[in-house]
Image (cartoon, rainbow, N blue to C red):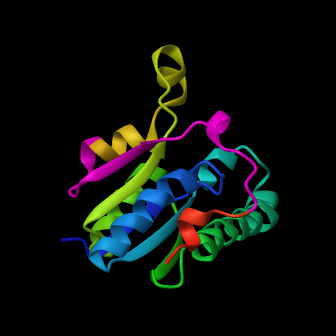
Amino acid sequence: MYDCILVPTDGSREVERALEYAVEFARTHDATIRALYVVNAAGYGGLPMETALGGVSDALHEEGRAAVGRIEELAPAAVTVDTAVIEGAPSRVIIEEADAAECDLIVMGTHGRGGIDRLLLGSVTERVVRRASVPVLTVQVDPDDIDDRSEEPWLTAE
């Protein structure tokens, strides 16, 4: 049923909660996980041109490589992980990448903001849910629920 599962990441520990679900789906269906980091350089448009073109872009791409690398590290050896770091608007890139990589499912975290916070901050997850051509599994992630475990037994158990 699932051959490719897209897991967008922002590099935060909270994403690991969504990864738990993606790993279980991948194990059950012998699927590949596609870890995606979107470099949203638009938020840095106010910087001087030479800064935006050089150091900031390199730093954002390096952050992206580290984020998808963390997904590779956490996934058990029995689960194949492909990675991608792509520039653009996060919700648009996530939807386009799901289609381009022929993913059958998107698994992503949501902070569950409501009211004025959601209006002010927007919601990448909400836009993906509304526009994706494949099912989207949203996982409530709350930084207060993440402990300081040094090992994630759910990820390493075979």
Closest to the observer, 150 or 5? 150
Would you say 112 lies left or right of 66 here? left
How far from the left and from the top, in percent, is residue 30? Answer: 31, 80
Say if residue 89 shows up in the picture. Answer: no
Q: Any magenta on residue 138? A: yes
Any part of residue 36 in sight:
yes
Height in image: 74 above or below 114? below
Q: Nearer the viewer, residue 47 or 66?
A: 66
Q: Is residue 111 above or below residue 64?
A: above
Q: Position of residue 80 (x, y in %)?
A: 45, 83
| Left or right: 11 in relation to 3 | right
Residue bounds of the magenta highlight: 130-150
Residue at left offset 63%, top offset 55%: 41
Position of residue 157 measured from the top left corner of the image (x, y, whole percent):
53, 73
Residue at the image position 42 percent from the left and 57 percent from the top: 21
- Image quadrant containing the N terminus: bottom left
Q: Nearer the viewer, residue 87 or 114?
A: 114
Identify whether 68 is placed above or below 48. Answer: below
